[in-house]
Amino acid sequence: MGEESHSIQVSGMQFSYDANSPLFFDFSLNIYPGSRCLLVGANGSGKTTLLRILAGKHMVGGRDVVRVLNCSAFHDTSLVCSGDLAYLGESWSKTVGSAGELPLQGDFSAEHMIFGVEGVDPVRRDKLIELLDIDLHWRMHKVSDGQRRRVQICMGLLHPYKVLLLDEVTVDLDVVARMDLLEFFKEECEQRRATIVYATHIFDGLETWATDLVYVQEGVLKRSDKLADLKELKNNMNLLSVVESWLRTETKIEKKKPVNSPSPLQKSSPFDNSPFRSSRHMAYYR
Ligand SMILES: Nc1ncnc2c1ncn2[C@@H]1O[C@H](COP(=O)(O)OP(=O)(O)OP(=O)(O)O)[C@@H](O)[C@H]1O
């Protein structure tokens, strides 16, 4: 990577919701331009919080602690205003970036929403509308969750971001829309050296998509690896199995495992009624 500077740089970050128990303590992370970085971890491990901190939604320490594109994520509002930093979070109302804070839903069209975003390259806009298969006549109070999500994603991507933070945004999309969107993101990273951090529990198709894997456990950075260097993948494990094994080790479920229960590396089923299958593990299938 030579002397290239990081697009995301977190140095010794501390953050707590509750003064008595810090979620992040002395947390550091560096991500290079052009990376497609998967952010993984159990429910409650801090992924959403980390993405929100990177998106400048929480003030954390001084100007040097959380840097995005060489600016302070919280203090330099130009990052978001310019569209250089885009964040697509869980809910419609949380979306920031080029699209700004969006209204929830109402009796207006998808066209009204999308064409209301100013300063947009029409070619990019048309490409996104086609990619996401959006019908501009959709009335936003009548669409399905997946259709609403498509419009949200479209608006969040209208400006050519340099850093994109994704928090489980593909969860409502059908498989075709999800794969097309992932391919689009890949192109954006390769052609423009955009950086993507994607928190997800769904690993289908990501072995060949992602370049980096960051694993967070209860606010602690446990792993930060190039996918190409992951020995488990080289040994023909798939990504789901790798992450599953890390999480199972973390929760020490194996200690309780009865003799006939499946191997921890075996792909689990959403219909498995095992008493050891807590709701956190069902999250793989959300
Ligand atoms: N607004 C909040 N106030 C207080 N505590 C919070 C708040 N948001 C999150 N937390 C706590 O911070 C921890 C990390 O939550 P976070 O949402 O970042 O986890 P996550 O890894 O994104 O989880 P998931 O995979 O379920 O989305 C959890 O213990 C959660 O209860």
Image: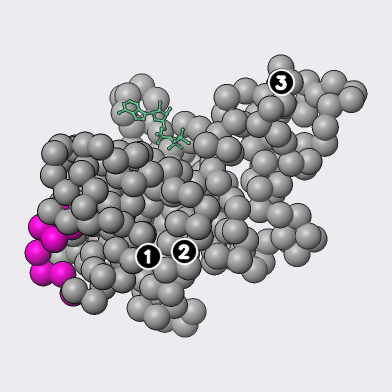
Task: Residue at 59%, 31% (x, y): give it.
Answer: 282
User: What's the distance in space between the residues labelled 2 and 1, CA to CA?
Assistant: 7 Å
Establish if 227 lies above or below 238. below
Expressed as whole percent of the image width and height from the top left, the position of residue 277 reads 67, 24
**Which secondary structure type mostly characterizes the magenta part of the structure?**
loop
User: What's the distance in space between the residues labelled 2 and 3, CA to CA?
Assistant: 34 Å
Expressed as whole percent of the image width and height from the top left, the position of residue 264 reads 77, 37
Crowd around label 1: few <14 · some 14–19 · many ≥20 (10 Å): some
Crowd around label 2: few <14 · some 14–19 · many ≥20 (10 Å): few
Task: Residue at 85%, 21% (x, y): give it.
Answer: 258
Circle 2 or circle 3, nearest the eye:
2
* Location of residue 133 (image quadrant): bottom left
The residue that label 1 is drawn on is: 131
**Residue 52 counted in the magenta span:** no
Q: Quarter for ligand 1?
A: top left
The residue that label 3 is drawn on is: 273
Question: Residues at badges 2 and 1 in contact (C-beta under 8 Å)?
Answer: yes
**Residue 117 counted in the magenta span:** yes
Magenta part of the chain: 113-121
The residue that label 2 is drawn on is: 180
Circle 1 or circle 3, nearest the eye:
1
* Location of residue 269 (image quadrant): top right
- The amino acid pointed to by label 3 is Asn
Question: Residues at badges 2 and 3 in contact (C-beta under 8 Å)?
Answer: no
